[in-house]
């Protein structure tokens, strides 16, 4: 992990015991007490520091391990700050509103569940946040499904599947940026490589939702309110497509993510200055605090009120704490001791990828935290992939296939608790119908054999 070298070599049983205790502690705080993840991770950091001191590791070495761990996430942190600016600038330039409006125009056919899945996916990619997508568009679709007497379980499954497709494939997503950064893979290479497993999972899910859809047309009455309110923002113009086109072109020409996001943000900001009538003072305030919509229609106001550097500070602080904790687990020898016990057995590609997927899934189940699933699994297996001659993009893809999209399937996870609350549908009720989330880890293991080698 990073450049952190262990300063103590505990026995395997001691390492496993300490690891289980810290995981249990984090799980108790997150699930039992419902705290923000920062609190238990900070406590775990303090306990690990105490463990290191008891094992006579100098505080200087402990501190260096913690700092090296946190430093490995600096590239992601700068991207997160830029994503906050990008979302704000895309709001005031009309890019996100016009994407949402375009997605809504697809509603109205008889394939209700399939359309809900597809539209939620489109909006999820444009927003880059599964929870925001679920809490806004998802709530609207639940209301529509209830009005037409559709299955709430299948509707919720379609919403969750689409939202996490967006979370996985959007260049605006913090987990997507985190997964690519943690194993040093270009963001757009990471997204492109994920298509190997994501496209089959998406198409299969779409077909399943189409088969299950009721043979009735959906009333578009509620949609008119959304479309009218989006138009009333006064932000949508033909120029609103330009920032998106720039980002797409940057992807095609393989321009580094930081530069691509920066250029798109600057262009969006300049367009917003021309079209929205906002002053430069207002724009800089929106860059930091995000955009606040005031259409008078609460669902759209909630949908568009987001972005800004300030909105990313929660994620950034969590990343710093989690990576610092990871650095401590390495400098104290906890993770190296566990790794060395089974590393020699990890020779075959399929076994390595299956083990990675199982670890990411296990962290989700035990801790219920999406970021830790990506970060701890990524740092743990980075050396294994290098020794096996597998490119890092295979690891980053597997982290998302089995880490990012599994979190909403765990009833006590951060995403599971949030989604069940806002949709009013228990996790275990929608779980069998969250096809995309269920298929992704399965397909990633299937692709880990001969077919995968062809693309690496």
Image (spheres, rainbow, N blue to C red):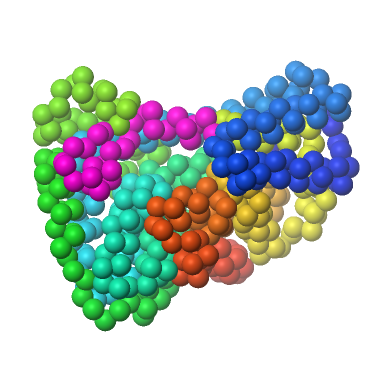
Question: In this rendering, does residue 196 appear at all?
Answer: no
Residue 392 is situated, as x and y percent measured from the top left of the image, at 58, 48
From the viewer's side, name the closer residue of 138 and 163: 138
Q: Residue at x 82, y 45 (%)?
A: 17
Q: Which residues are magenta?
A: 291-318
Q: Is residue 309 magenta?
A: yes
* Horizontal relation, residue 207 to residue 321: left or right: left
The picture places residue 329, in percent across and down from the top left corner, at 73, 36
Quadrant of the drawing holding the C terminus:
bottom right
Q: Quadrant of residue 214?
A: bottom left
7 over 438 or under it: above or below:
above
Q: Is residue 113 left or right of residue 386?
A: left
Say which of 30 and 351 sits in front: 30
Up the image or down, 140 lies above or below 328; here it is: below
Inspect the magenta stretch and tell me whether residue 252 lies in it: no
Magenta residues: mostly which secondary structure?
helix
Identified at 32% across, 27% down, the residue is 289
Q: Residue at x 17, y 65 (%)?
A: 220
- Residue situated in front as seen by the camera: 192 or 35: 35
Q: Position of residue 373 (x, y in %)?
A: 60, 48
Q: How many marks are shown on the rendered structure?
A: 0
List x then y, in percent, for residue 342. Answer: 80, 54
């Amino acid at each position: 992990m990073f450049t952190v070298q262990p300063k103590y070599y505990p026995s395997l049983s001691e390492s496993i015991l300490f690891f289980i205790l810290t995981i249990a502690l984090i799980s108790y705080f997150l699930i039992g007490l419902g705290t923000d993840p920062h609190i238990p991770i900070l406590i775990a950091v303090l306990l690990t520091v105490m463990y290191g001191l008891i094992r006579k590791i100098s505080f200087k070495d402990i501190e260096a391990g913690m700092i090296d761990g946190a430093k490995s996430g600096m590239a992601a942190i700068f991207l997160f700050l830029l994503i906050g600016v990008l979302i704000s600038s895309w709001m005031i330039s009309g890019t996100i509103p016009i994407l949402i409006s375009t997605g809504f125009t697809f509603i109205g056919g008889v394939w209700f569940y399939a359309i809900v899945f597809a539209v939620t996916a489109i909006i999820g990619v444009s927003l880059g946040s599964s929870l925001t997508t679920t809490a806004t568009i998802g709530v609207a679709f639940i209301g529509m499904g209830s009005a037409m007497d559709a299955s709430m379980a299948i509707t919720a499954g379609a919403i969750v599947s689409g939202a996490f497709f967006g979370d996985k494939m959007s260049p605006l997503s913090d987990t997507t940026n985190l997964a690519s950064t943690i194993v040093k893979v270009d963001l757009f290479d990471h997204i492109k490589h994920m298509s190997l497993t994501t496209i089959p999972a998406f198409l299969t899910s779409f077909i399943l939702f189409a088969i299950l859809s009721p043979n009735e047309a959906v009333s578009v009455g509620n949609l008119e309110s959304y479309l009218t309110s989006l138009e009333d923002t006064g932000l949508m113009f033909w120029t609103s497509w330009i920032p998106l086109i720039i980002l797409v072109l940057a992807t095609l020409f393989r321009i580094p993510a930081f530069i691509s996001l920066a250029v798109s943000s600057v262009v969006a900001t300049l367009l917003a200055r021309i079209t929205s009538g906002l002053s430069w003072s207002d724009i800089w305030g929106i860059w930091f605090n995000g955009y606040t919509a005031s259409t008078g229609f609460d669902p759209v106001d909630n949908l568009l009120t987001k972005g800004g550097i300030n909105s990313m500070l929660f994620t950034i602080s969590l990343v710093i704490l989690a990576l610092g904790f990871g650095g401590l687990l390495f400098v104290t020898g906890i993770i190296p001791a566990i790794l060395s016990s089974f590393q020699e057995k990890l020779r075959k590609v399929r076994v390595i990828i299956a083990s990675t997927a199982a670890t990411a899934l296990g962290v989700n189940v035990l801790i219920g935290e999406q970021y830790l699933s990506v970060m701890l699994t990524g740092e743990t297996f980075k050396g294994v992939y290098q020794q096996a001659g597998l490119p890092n993009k295979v690891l980053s893809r597997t982290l998302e296939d089995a880490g990012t999209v599994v979190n909403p399937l765990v009833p006590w996870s951060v995403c599971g608790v949030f989604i069940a609350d806002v949709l009013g549908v228990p996790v275990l009720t929608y779980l069998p119908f969250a096809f995309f989330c269920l298929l992704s880890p399965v397909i990633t293991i299937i692709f880990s054999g001969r077919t995968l080698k062809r693309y690496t």
